[in-house]
Structures are given as structure tokens and as C-alpha cells.
Image: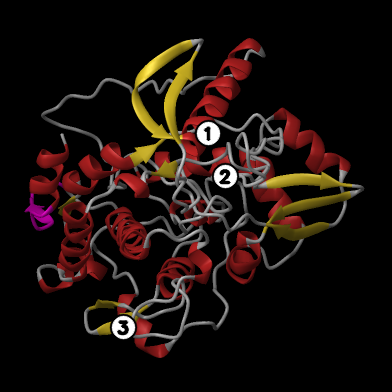
């Protein structure tokens, strides 16, 4: 599997162009997003003039970008942790004979999917760099701004996430990606302009705030962007594309809003993630009314009750530990993984084994309490010869 991935991921991003399907235009009369918020007709003047070249154009062409290579890679190295049970994980016990605790010890450590950074070898990391460079060159093949908005949104999300994962992998082991400095820059990972698209140098934060947040009105776009740490939206185990982008944003948004790293109650205040502070000028100008309305659109009953019982909203929650299995540490202790009193045949670091056992126990508890171990998606039948176009993310 690893060898196949190395060979596949090195291939350039492919483009398939068709001309027979009519492009769907946005309905200017629509004033409400799918997340239930009143649409903002004008964004705040937070743009950098050079980024205006990425403004989506009207009358999009019917060109599709193929992300199957990235899809295969994500299925290979994304480890799913399951939905939140809204319980903080207890402090782990030190390893026998020492006071040192290796691996993840955060109360949020059982939330959010993980990238198996500690298992990526040099060949795979090199392939990530090549793929990121291929994505950067996509505008040399097709003008991104002429694509349908779902195509454009999927491109920017995938480029952002590939770049974040690649840079962390290059620097690994690192315990907190937010503190990572990119080679040749004194700026942290999120602000370093190590990407170049259509001649414009940009950072991951630029992609979010100067392109996507400027040109999309649906606040669910917030949840597409992986930041490399536990505190942010979860990385999905499939690539975004024009057909699934709305579905994946909804899935990621519901996961995040209904987790402890998304929402908590403190007295009569609703505590929310710091990511909403960044998004506030673009999507939630009438704070706290706008953010509460958005959260209600994605919240399950337990979180809905919290929203209704609180008044002010404080964006103060965040966990900066890396979203991996080992917390960016080399645990010198190895052992065999034991699940349900059965010893598995693979020897792994004890800190990773502990996390996997904790995850297993969490999922068992979730099932006992009547929760979902997974999601079932019902897809209406479509004629393969005449597929319908997915709803566009506004």
C-alpha cells in the first residue's frame, strides 16, 4: 500500500475538461445561506489589492479538477478518532518507573482526526511537496477564477491543507504547529508566504481570509481548513471536490460545533473556539447574535441547550497540540497494543498504544450510550448518464 501511494501521489494533478453540461449561475435573490444566516452582501474591506485577481468570475466554465491522488493519500494517513462524547479526557498516568508522560495529555486528545506524521517516510514527504507544487501550478493550465464556485472552493481548501500537512511533515517531530517557523522566514507556519499561485505569494492564512472568506458567504467554509493541531477543524479522510464540498463542510462543521473544542459553557457565558474570532469580521459582524445563529444551525440537542442557557459569547477555546498520534514526541518505550484483553502483533510506542486504547474505550462508551459510531449517508439514485449538479456553496 505504501509503495502504491508513493507512486500515485507523485503524479501531477489531472484536469478533465468537458463542455456538454450547462454551468449553474448563482441566484442573486437568495438572501439566506444554507447555515441559516442572513447573507452579507458586502464583505469588510480587509482585502489586499493583489488578491483581487482571485475574485470568482461570472458564467463559469465546466472544467473539473481531479483530486483522486490526494483522496488516496488522505485515506492512507488520516486516522479517524470518532465523534466527540463531550467529556474531557482525564490526565494520563506516567509510565511505570518514571514521572514522565509521553504522548498526548490534553483533555481534548480524543477529539478530531489525526495525521499519522510519525509513520510518514522521506519518500512520502517528498511526494507531498511535489503534489503541493503541482497544485500551485494549476492556474497555468486553467484560470481558477473561471471555474464553478464549488470547484474553486475545493481547490483552495485542498491547497491549504496539503501545504499545512507537507510543512509539518518536513519539520516533524514538532509538538505545536502554530510555533513552527518555515525555512527562510521568521514567520510562523500560518503566516509565512511559502505558497505561490498565479505569481502571488501567499500564506495559509491568506487563502482563508483574503480569498475564501472574502468571496464565500456561507460560514461553513470555516470548517474546511485544517490547521495541523487538535484545536481546529478536523482533517477529513477524503479530498474536497466540486460534488462533495458542501457535504464535507457540513460534516466537519457538525463535528466541530458539537465537540468540546468547539463549544463549552462557563457560568452564563458560551465559550467557543478562537477560530471564530478570525472569522468574525466576515461572517459574524453582529456578535454574539450571528455566531449563536450559526451554531444553532449545526448544533445537536446538548449544545442547543447550552446555547439557549447562555448569554455572552467568548472566543477563548483552543488546543495547540499537534493532531498526530504521538504529540510530536519520540517515546523510548515500546510495547504491544492490547485491545479487549487481546494482544495485537504490532509493536508500537506506548504513548500511541495508550491513545488507541483510549479511543477504543471512547467509542465503546459512545455505543453504550446510544451514540453514533459512524455516519450513514443516503444518496439518492442518479442516472450515471445524466448526473445532477450538486448544490453550490454560496
Mark whose residue sits in front, 2 or 3 = 2
Considering only order in the chain, which callout, 3 or 2, is on the residue closer to the N terminus?
2
Magenta span has 19?
Answer: yes
Q: Eyeballing the image, is 71 above or below 177?
A: above
C-alpha separation, residue under disc 3 versus residue under disc 1: 39 Å
Residue 182 vs residue 101, the one in the foreground: 101
Q: Residues within 10 Å of mark 3 (few under 14, many from 20)?
A: some
Q: Eyeballing the image, is 345 above or below 43?
A: above
Secondary structure under the numbered disc 1 in the rendered image? helix
- Do the residues under discs 2 and 1 have CB atoms within 8 angstroms? yes
The residue sitting at 92% across, 47% down in the picture is 267
Which residue is denoted by mark 1 in the rendering?
Answer: 355
C-alpha separation, residue under disc 2 versus residue under disc 1: 7 Å
Which residue is denoted by mark 3 in the rendering?
Answer: 201
Q: Residues within 10 Å of mark 1 (few under 14, many from 20)?
A: many
Q: Is residue 263 visible?
A: yes
Q: Is residue 390 visible?
A: no
Look at the magenta stretch and give its main secondary structure. Answer: loop
C-alpha separation, residue under disc 2 versus residue under disc 3: 35 Å
Q: Can you tell which mark lies on residue 104?
A: 2
Q: Where residue 293 sits: x, y (%)?
A: 70, 49
Q: Eyeballing the image, is 365 above or below 102?
A: above
Q: Residues within 10 Å of mark 2 (few under 14, many from 20)?
A: many
The residue sitting at 28% across, 51% down in the picture is 24
The N terminus - image quarter? top left
Q: Where residue 341 sits: x, y (%)?
A: 51, 10
Considering only order in the chain, which callout, 1 or 3, is on the residue closer to the N terminus?
3
Considering only order in the chain, which callout, 1 or 2, is on the residue closer to the N terminus?
2
The residue sitting at 63% across, 44% down in the picture is 105
Amino acid at each position: 500500500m505504501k509503495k502504491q501511494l508513493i507512486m500515485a501521489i507523485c503524479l501531477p494533478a489531472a484536469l478533465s475538461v468537458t463542455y456538454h453540461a450547462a454551468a449553474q449561475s448563482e441566484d442573486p435573490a437568495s438572501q439566506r445561506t444554507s447555515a441559516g444566516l442572513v447573507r452579507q452582501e458586502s464583505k469588510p474591506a480587509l482585502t489586499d489589492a493583489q488578491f483581487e485577481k482571485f475574485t470568482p468570475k461570472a458564467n463559469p466554465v465546466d472544467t473539473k479538477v481531479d483530486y483522486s491522488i490526494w483522496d488516496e493519500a488522505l485515506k492512507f494517513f488520516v486516522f479517524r478518532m470518532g465523534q466527540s462524547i463531550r467529556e474531557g479526557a482525564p490526565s494520563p498516568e506516567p509510565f511505570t518507573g518514571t514521572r514522565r508522560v509521553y504522548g498526548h495529555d490534553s483533555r481534548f486528545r480524543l477529539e478530531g482526526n489525526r495525521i499519522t506524521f510519525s509513520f510518514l517516510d522521506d519518500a512520502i514527504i517528498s511526494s507531498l511537496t511535489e503534489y503541493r507544487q503541482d497544485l500551485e501550478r494549476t492556474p497555468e493550465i486553467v484560470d481558477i477564477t473561471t471555474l464553478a464556485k464549488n470547484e474553486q472552493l475545493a481547490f483552495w481548501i485542498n491547497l491549504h491543507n496539503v501545504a499545512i500537512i507537507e510543512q509539518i511533515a518536513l519539520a516533524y517531530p514538532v509538538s505545536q504547529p502554530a510555533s513552527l517557523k518555515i525555512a527562510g522566514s521568521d514567520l510562523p507556519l500560518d503566516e509565512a508566504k511559502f505558497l505561490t499561485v498565479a505569481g502571488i505569494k501567499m500564506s495559509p492564512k491568506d487563502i482563508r481570509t483574503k480569498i475564501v472568506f472574502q468571496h464565500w458567504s456561507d460560514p461553513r467554509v470555516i470548517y474546511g481548513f485544517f490547521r495541523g493541531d487538535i484545536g481546529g477543524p478536523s482533517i477529513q479522510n477524503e479530498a474536497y471536490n466540486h460534488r462533495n464540498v458542501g457535504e464535507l463542510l457540513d460534516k466537519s462543521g457538525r463535528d466541530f460545533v458539537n465537540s468540546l473544542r468547539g463549544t463549552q459553557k462557563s457560568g452564563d457565558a458560551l465559550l467557543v473556539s478562537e477560530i471564530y474570532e478570525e472569522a468574525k469580521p466576515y461572517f459574524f459582524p453582529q456578535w454574539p447574535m450571528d455566531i449563536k445563529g450559526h451554531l444553532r444551525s449545526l448544533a445537536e440537542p446538548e449544545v442547543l441547550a447550552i446555547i439557549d442557557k447562555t448569554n455572552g459569547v467568548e472566543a477563548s477555546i483552543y488546543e495547540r497540540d499537534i493532531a498526530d498520534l504521538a504529540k510530536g514526541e519520540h517515546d523510548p518505550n515500546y510495547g504491544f497494543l492490547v485491545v479487549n484483553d487481546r494482544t495485537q502483533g504490532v509493536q508500537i510506542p506506548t504513548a500511541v498504544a495508550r491513545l488507541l486504547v483510549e479511543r477504543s474505550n471512547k467509542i465503546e462508551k459512545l455505543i453504550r450510550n446510544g451514540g453514533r459510531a459512524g455516519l450513514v449517508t443516503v444518496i439518492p439514485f442518479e442516472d450515471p448518464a445524466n448526473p445532477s449538479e450538486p448544490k453550490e456553496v454560496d
